[in-house]
């Protein structure tokens, strides 16, 4: 599964860099602070605009995911969603991270939220279909793969999964 990144993430990354550069701790301050308190601030909390702050946390989630820090990615996407509950890409990407961590139920919930925000989100339907199949819900998986194909008739992976399910479980109603 692939995470989703849009151009707003690039803008948010610039906001993180700008905000982080405004926060400076002198070497003397760092030495006087307890070691567990000297940490790199995220910078997102310094962004005034709520849309950009949500995008900033989304960008942090993308970066954490790329580093393989899936739990940190989930936390960053969750922060983005607390600020902007309509941030569909954060639901989608949090679903990918949940799935990769072995939590298909949580992934399904996130993909469903992404679909509720964008009924044409073929990737969310496809990934939700995979998670449903993993849980043994072949009817739900088939419905999601069919939804993927209704949005994009060229989605070969979705067609492949439908063919696979129908071949190995021919008693399923299609």
Image (cartoon, helix red, strand yellow):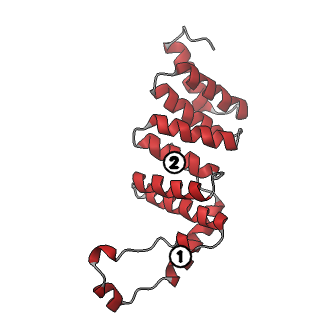
Instruction: Name the spot of residue 123 as percent of width and height, x first.
Output: 61, 40
Instruction: Name the spot of residue 114 as percent of width and height, x first.
Output: 63, 43
Q: Earlier in the sequence, mark 2 or mark 1?
A: 1
Q: Is residue 70 above or below residue 20?
A: above
Q: Which picture quadrant has residue 49?
A: bottom right
Residue at 54% from the left image edge and 71% from the top image edge: 45
Residue at 46% from the left image edge and 55% from the top image edge: 75
Instruction: Name the spot of residue 77 as percent of width and height, x first.
Output: 52, 55
Left or right, residue 135 beside residue 30: right
Q: Is residue 107 above or below residue 73?
A: above
Left or right, residue 40 beside residue 77: left
Judge the density around disc 2: few (<14), some (14-19), many (≥20) Cα neighbours within 10 Å.
many
* Mark 2 in CB contact with mark 1 (< 8 angstroms): no
Q: SS of the residue at dot 2?
A: helix
Residue at 33% from the left image edge and 75% from the top image edge: 37
Residue at 57% from the left image edge and 52% from the top image edge: 90
Which residue position is annotated with label 1?
17
Left or right, residue 113 beside residue 64: right
Q: Answer yes or no: is residue 121 visible.
A: no
Which residue position is annotated with label 2?
94
Q: CA distance from mark 2 to mark 1?
A: 23 Å
Q: Which mark is residue 87?
A: none
Judge the density around disc 1: few (<14), some (14-19), many (≥20) Cα neighbours within 10 Å.
some
Q: SS of the residue at dot 1?
A: helix
> Of residues 159 and 29, which is closer to you in this image?
29
Q: Answer yes or no: is residue 144 visible.
A: yes
């Amino acid at each position: 599964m692939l995470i989703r990144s849009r151009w707003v993430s690039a803008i948010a990354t610039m906001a993180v860099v700008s905000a982080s550069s405004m926060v400076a701790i002198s070497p003397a301050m760092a030495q006087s602070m307890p070691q567990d308190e000297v940490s790199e601030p995220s910078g997102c909390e310094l962004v005034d605009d709520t849309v950009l702050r949500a995008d900033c946390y989304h960008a942090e989630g993308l970066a954490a995911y790329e580093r393989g820090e899936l739990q940190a990615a989930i936390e960053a996407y969750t922060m983005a969603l607390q600020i902007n509950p309509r941030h569909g890409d954060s639901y989608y990407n949090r679903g990918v991270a949940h799935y990769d961590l072995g939590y298909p139920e949580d992934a399904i919930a996130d993909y469903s939220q992404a679909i509720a925000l964008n009924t044409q989100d073929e990737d969310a339907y496809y990934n939700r279909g995979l998670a449903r199949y993993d849980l043994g819900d072949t009817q739900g998986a088939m419905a999601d793969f069919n939804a993927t194909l209704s949005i994009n008739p060229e989605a070969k992976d979705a067609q492949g999964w439908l063919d696979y399910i129908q071949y190995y479980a021919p008693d399923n109603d299609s």
